[in-house]
Image: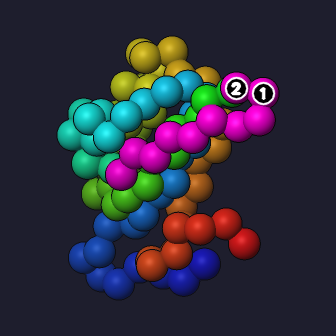
Amino acid sequence: MTAHPAGEPPTFRIRVQGRLGPEWSDRLGGMKVTAWEAAGGTVFAELTGPLTDEAALMGVLEHLYNLRMPLLAVERVEIGRTGDD
């Protein structure tokens, strides 16, 4: 992973089990919210976007915890790269 330029916040990808729509973006640090349904009907959501610091990350994670969304993954991604390899 490459370092972020000075002044640029790191980008994170957070995956949870459950349904979240784009209307949650403002309440989740402005992260882009994408949802999909897997085979078998299980619903997942992915949040992607920059977070200014660890406190912002913890705020998003706490909000998801309070919503009782099972956390599947949290990862820091390279700038301009949000897809899986």
Residue 31 appears at what percent x and percent y?
Answer: 33, 50
Between the residue at mark 1 and the residue at mark 2, the CA separation in whole angstroms equals: 4 Å
Quarter placement of the N terminus = bottom right
Asked whether residue 23 is in view, the answer is yes
Query: Callout 2: 10 Å neighbours few (<14), some, many (20+)?
Result: few
Query: Callout 1: 10 Å neighbours few (<14), some, many (20+)?
Result: few
What amino acid is at disc 1?
Gly
Q: Which disc number belongs to residue 40?
A: 1
Which of these two is toward me, 30 or 65? Answer: 30
Q: Classify residue 6 by image quadrant.
A: bottom left
Residue 47 appears at what percent x and percent y?
Answer: 45, 47
Identify the magenta region. Answer: 32-41
**Which residue is located at x 34 percent, y 60 percent?**
50
Marks 1 and 2: CB-CB under 8 Å? yes
Residue receiving disc 2: 41
Q: Residue lying at the far right in this picture: please name it.
A: 40
Quarter placement of the C terminus = bottom right
Q: Residue lying at the far left in this picture: please name it.
A: 26
Residue 3 appears at what percent x and percent y?
Answer: 48, 81
